[in-house]
């Protein structure tokens, strides 16, 4: 003030070069630099955490996709008494192999090669690996074959460097024979009690079916509700109340939705417990408010001039909505849907309430079959005492993240497609 | 509100300003649209007070008046665009070819096809130029095949004087055109559904003088094929493009007559004051 005000009341010309001015400029620059530095720090920190998380998970999880194997020589002609390959082809070959006593054949072969206690080295599912190998190539039955079979869980953990002393001693003894192979079982099997035999496919399929049910219900209902509320509903006390309720619903803790699903879908409607249908319904309830809210915002953002233009050439209200408003709002609606679905995919608590935490050893074939989903599977495995489950849990997390990224990528692709078309 | 305006409002309510039939007539021939004693309310507020005007085929009718005088509101009554505003209420009679457009059996959608509209801001659909024009004919089933539709698109663009500029890029987005071109596209879009009346709500207010000149030229060319009603607050424009002019003030119709008379020899003092730029 002292450089402007004068005793006579006449304004002196401002001195833009004065010390006070220079100081002010320096202060402004400093403030901007500070702000930039803070923002950059925040980004670097969060990126660092993310990278750390991913690295740790990859480090643990990738081992879950491999298994430790021991070679086993099986003299099939001698063991089976000369079974011919042609007998074991076709759809029921699996049952025929069982009837042949394949498990005993494998165990006998193991004892021949690794001594009386040899069977303890191998995973209980080793004979299944043999069975699968024969199903792939029946000609094996007519020769002496050497197959790499999964070892027992503690040995597996020890070979990967995290085992108990006894298992580590065994690993040293066998070190020249042990090897690592890709664990196809993990991608093809379902839950099991033996960590060497568990697989993610059952939970993955359960998640797929559940998400499908959720999307099929929440998306159309959510979009229609958003369109109705924005385009048709009169603005009065009732619609205000509905709006408040929807906003509140979006903030309700997910476990409450689980209780609701338990009370309504299971107890009232008597739908099957643990089913993907009930899980999907429950998650749809949870996802719908998110879609409605984002949908309403997207619809609101469509310029009124487009509506007027369409009305002006004589489009009916429904034509205005479906030809003009909806296509323009779709990218925004899809963004909301991605957020809602991503949340639903990672949701565990409500699914526990409706019984989707059961031990599911066969993948679900339909919406009413007992199923579990990836996050619940992760939760269950992380609770297991057996050390073999640690890496399986991490591997399941990787599968969940890949699923999530794929789902989002598809949604973003769709969104961009709609954006460019309009 | 100044004392002068308050006084004027009081004056408007007196019976002496009620229009006689000769004052509201549109000129030669039967009127295309007639309006009698139209009142429009937005909730409690009355936006239009007792307006009666006829519009006919041969003339371009201009509505002039200061901002907020209700000329756009009145225009929007003519194709019931006011229906989209929940609190708007219209009373009085408005007819198109003798049919009451506010009658319950009147189909609003068809009415809006018959009474097309061009808006203040160019508002092409964010679709291709072709689809912009073809949309109206498609939803009304005006074309039986692709060829007929192509023909309608070409004719409409030609009438709007846009064909030469866009014929090689019909698949480009309508929003990629310049402002003036967009507005002519909107006129072509209105023409494409073969309307009887075209309402233009300040069609040039967002355009530069050259684009404005083109639109005015276009209005000259399509005059006679459609009854045209144009709202403008550019008085020179009203003088240039219209044959009939209506002067609105504070929701009332002050004067309606032949454009040259309104501009050279207005009957009402208020009209003269507005035209000579004393207020508005």
Image (cartoon, coloured by chain):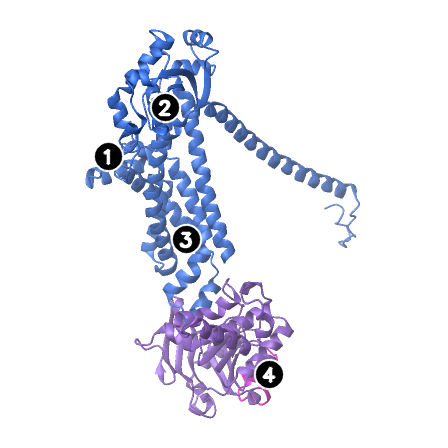
| Along the line of sight, the residue nearer the viewer: A310 or A104 | A104
Q: Position of residue A18 (x, y in %)?
A: 79, 44
Provide the secondary structure element on which disc 2 rests.
helix
Disc 2 marks which residue? A140
Checking the image for residue B240, the label placed there is 4
Disc 1 marks which residue? A273
Spatial separation of the CA atoms under disc 4 and disc 3: 45 Å
Q: Which chain is blue?
A: A
- Circle 2 or circle 4, nearest the eye: 2
Q: Which quadrant of the rendered structure holds the C terminus of chain B?
A: bottom right
Q: Which chain is purple?
A: B
- Label 1 with label 3: CB-CB less than 8 Å: no
Provide the secondary structure element on which disc 1 rests.
loop
First in sequence: mark 2 vs mark 1: 2
Q: Is residue A264 above or below residue A179?
A: below
Provide the secondary structure element on which disc 3 rests.
helix
Spatial separation of the CA atoms under disc 1 and disc 3: 34 Å
Residue at point 32%, 47% (across, down): A217
Spatial separation of the CA atoms under disc 2 and disc 4: 97 Å
Pointer 3 chain: A
Checking the image for residue A296, the label placed there is 3
B254 displayed left or right of A24? left
Instruction: Say yes or no: labels 4 and 3 on the same chain.
Output: no
B163 displayed left or right of A134? right
């Amino acid at each position: 003030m002292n450089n402007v005000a004068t005793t006579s009341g006449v304004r002196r010309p401002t001195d833009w070069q004065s010390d006070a001015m220079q100081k002010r400029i320096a202060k402004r620059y400093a403030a901007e630099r500070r702000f930039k530095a803070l923002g950059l720090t925040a980004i670097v920190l969060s990126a660092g955490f993310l990278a750390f998380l991913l690295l740790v998970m990859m480090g643990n999880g990738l081992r879950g996709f491999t298994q430790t194997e021991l070679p086993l020589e099986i003299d099939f002609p001698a063991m089976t008494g000369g079974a011919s390959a042609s007998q074991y082809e076709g759809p029921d070959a699996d049952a025929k192999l069982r009837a042949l006593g394949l498990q005993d054949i494998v165990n006998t072969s193991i004892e021949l090669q690794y001594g009386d206690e040899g069977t303890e080295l191998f995973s209980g599912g080793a004979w299944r690996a043999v069975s699968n190998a024969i199903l792939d190539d029946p000609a094996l039955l007519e020769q002496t074959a050497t197959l790499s079979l999964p070892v027992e869980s503690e040995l597996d953990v020890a070979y990967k460097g995290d085992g108990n002393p006894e298992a580590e001693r065994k690993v040293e003894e066998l070190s020249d024979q042990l090897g690592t192979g890709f664990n196809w079982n993990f991608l093809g099997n379902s839950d099991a009690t033996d960590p060497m035999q568990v697989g993610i496919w059952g939970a993955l399929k359960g998640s797929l079916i559940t998400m499908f049910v959720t999307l099929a219900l929440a998306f159309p209902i959510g979009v229609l509700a958003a369109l109705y509320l924005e385009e048709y509903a009169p603005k009065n006390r009732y619609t205000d109340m509905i709006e408040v309720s929807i906003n509140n619903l979006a903030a309700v803790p997910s476990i409450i939705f689980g209780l609701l699903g338990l009370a309504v879908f299971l107890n009232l409607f008597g739908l099957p417990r643990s089913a993907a249908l009930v899980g999907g319904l429950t998650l749809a309830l949870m996802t719908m408010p998110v879609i409605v809210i984002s949908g309403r915002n997207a619809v609101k953002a469509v310029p009124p001039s487009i509506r007027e233009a369409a009305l002006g050439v004589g489009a009916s209200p429904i034509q205005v909505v479906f030809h003009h408003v909806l296509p323009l709002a779709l990218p925004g609606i899809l963004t909301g849907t991605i957020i809602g679905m991503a949340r639903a995919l990672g949701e565990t608590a409500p699914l526990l309430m409706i019984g989707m935490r059961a031990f599911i050893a066969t993948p679900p074939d339909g919406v009413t079959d007992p199923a579990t989903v990836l996050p619940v599977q992760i939760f269950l495995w992380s609770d297991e005492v057996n050390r073999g489950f640690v890496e399986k849990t991490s591997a399941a997390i990787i599968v969940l993240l890949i699923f999530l990224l794929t789902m989002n990528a598809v949604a973003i692709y769709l969104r961009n497609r709609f954006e460019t078309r309009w | 509100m100044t004392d002068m305006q308050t006084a004027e409002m009081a004056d408007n309510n007196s019976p002496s300003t009620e229009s006689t039939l000769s004052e509201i007539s549109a000129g030669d021939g039967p009127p295309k649209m007639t309006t009698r004693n139209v009142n429009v309310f937005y909730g409690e507020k009355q936006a239009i007070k007792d307006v009666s005007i006829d519009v006919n085929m041969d003339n371009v009718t201009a509505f002039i008046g200061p901002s907020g005088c209700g000329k756009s509101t009145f225009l929007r009554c003519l194709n019931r665009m006011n229906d989209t505003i929940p609190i708007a209420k219209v009373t009085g009679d408005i007819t198109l070819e003798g049919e009451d457009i506010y009658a319950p059996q009147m189909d609003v959608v068809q009415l809006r096809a018959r009474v097309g509209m061009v808006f203040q801001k160019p508002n092409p659909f964010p679709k291709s130029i072709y689809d912009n024009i073809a949309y109206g004919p498609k939803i009304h089933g005006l074309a039986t095949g692709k060829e007929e539709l192509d023909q309608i698109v070409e004719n409409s663009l030609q009438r709007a004087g846009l064909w030469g500029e866009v014929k090689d890029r019909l698949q480009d987005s309508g929003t990629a055109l310049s402002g003036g071109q967009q507005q002519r596209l909107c006129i072509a879009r209105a023409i494409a559904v073969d309307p009887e009346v075209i309402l233009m709500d300040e069609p040039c207010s967002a355009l530069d003088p050259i684009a404005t000149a083109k639109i005015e030229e276009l209005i000259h060319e399509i005059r006679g094929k459609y009854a045209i009603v144009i709202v403008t607050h550019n008085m020179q424009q009203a003088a240039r493009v219209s044959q009939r002019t209506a002067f609105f003030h504070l929701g009332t119709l002050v004067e309606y007559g032949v454009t040259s008379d309104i501009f050279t020899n207005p009957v009402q003092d208020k009209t003269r004051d507005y035209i000579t730029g004393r207020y508005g």
